[in-house]
Image (tube, rainbow, N blue to C red):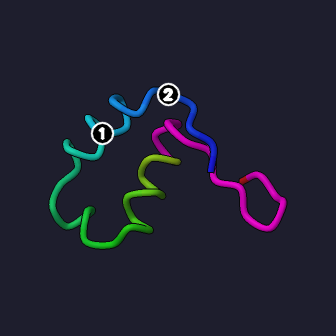
Amino acid sequence: MTKLVEQDEIDRFVASLPPEKKVDVKDVILALHEEGLIRIEEKGQVH
Protein backbone atom coordinates (compact mmCIF):
# COMPACT_ATOMS: atom_id res chain seq x y z
CA MET A 1 0.00 0.00 0.00
CA THR A 2 1.33 3.43 -0.94
CA LYS A 3 0.11 6.55 0.81
CA LEU A 4 -0.39 9.32 -1.71
CA VAL A 5 -1.29 11.94 0.91
CA GLU A 6 -0.27 12.79 4.47
CA GLN A 7 -1.44 10.57 7.32
CA ASP A 8 -3.58 13.36 8.83
CA GLU A 9 -5.53 13.63 5.59
CA ILE A 10 -6.13 9.88 5.65
CA ASP A 11 -7.26 10.12 9.29
CA ARG A 12 -9.69 12.92 8.42
CA PHE A 13 -11.16 10.94 5.54
CA VAL A 14 -11.56 7.81 7.66
CA ALA A 15 -13.22 9.87 10.41
CA SER A 16 -15.72 11.19 7.85
CA LEU A 17 -16.79 7.71 6.72
CA PRO A 18 -20.17 6.44 7.91
CA PRO A 19 -19.92 3.86 10.74
CA GLU A 20 -20.93 0.95 8.52
CA LYS A 21 -17.92 1.63 6.28
CA LYS A 22 -15.57 1.39 9.27
CA VAL A 23 -16.67 -2.08 10.39
CA ASP A 24 -14.27 -3.87 8.06
CA VAL A 25 -10.69 -2.74 7.57
CA LYS A 26 -10.89 -3.83 3.95
CA ASP A 27 -13.81 -1.45 3.38
CA VAL A 28 -11.82 1.44 4.84
CA ILE A 29 -8.78 0.65 2.69
CA LEU A 30 -10.97 0.27 -0.39
CA ALA A 31 -12.66 3.61 0.32
CA LEU A 32 -9.25 5.29 0.71
CA HIS A 33 -8.15 3.71 -2.55
CA GLU A 34 -11.31 4.82 -4.39
CA GLU A 35 -10.85 8.33 -3.03
CA GLY A 36 -7.31 8.34 -4.44
CA LEU A 37 -5.65 8.75 -1.05
CA ILE A 38 -3.73 5.49 -1.22
CA ARG A 39 -2.69 2.99 -3.85
CA ILE A 40 -3.14 -0.71 -3.20
CA GLU A 41 -0.46 -3.02 -4.53
CA GLU A 42 -1.32 -6.70 -4.49
CA LYS A 43 0.89 -9.52 -5.70
CA GLY A 44 3.05 -7.08 -7.60
CA GLN A 45 0.14 -5.55 -9.50
CA VAL A 46 -1.05 -1.98 -9.18
CA HIS A 47 -4.82 -1.67 -9.24
- Where on the picture, by quarter, is residue 10? top left
* Residue occupying the point 33% across, 72% down: 24
In the rendered image, the vertical position of residue 15 relative to residue 9, given as above or below? below
Residue 12 placed where, x, y %?
26, 35
Q: Residue 35: give its label.
A: none
The residues tagged by marks 1 and 2 sit, at their Cα atoms, a distance apart of 10 Å
Residue 5 counted in the magenta span? no
Amino acid on which the number 1 mark rests in the picture: Asp
Q: Nearer the viewer, residue 41 or 18?
A: 41
Residue 26 placed where, x, y %?
44, 68
Determine whether the residue tagged by mark 2 lies in a helix, strand or loop: loop
* Residue occupying the point 71% across, 56% down: 41
Q: 10 Å neighbourhood of mark 2: few (<14), some, or many (≥20)?
A: few
- Which residue is under mark 1? 11
In the rendered image, the vertical position of residue 38 relative to residue 7, given as above or below? below
In the rendered image, the vertical position of residue 16 relative to residue 18, given as above or below? above
Outermost residue toward the bottom in this view: 24
Q: Relative to residue 21, is residue 42 drawn left or right?
A: right
User: What residue span does the magenta drawing correspond to?
Assistant: 34-46
Residue 42 placed where, x, y %?
73, 64
* Residue occupying the point 20% across, 67% down: 20
- Where on the picture, by quarter, is residue 16? top left
Residue 28 placed where, x, y %?
37, 58
**First in sequence: mark 1 or mark 2?**
2
Quadrant of the frame with the C terminus: bottom right
Q: 10 Å neighbourhood of mark 1: few (<14), some, or many (≥20)?
A: few
Amino acid on which the number 2 mark rests in the picture: Val
Residues tagged 1 and 2 counted as in contact (Cβ below 8 A):
no
Q: Residue 5: give its label.
A: 2
Determine whether the residue tagged by mark 1 lies in a helix, strand or loop: helix
Outermost residue toward the left in this view: 19
Q: Relative to residue 23, is residue 32 drawn left or right?
A: right
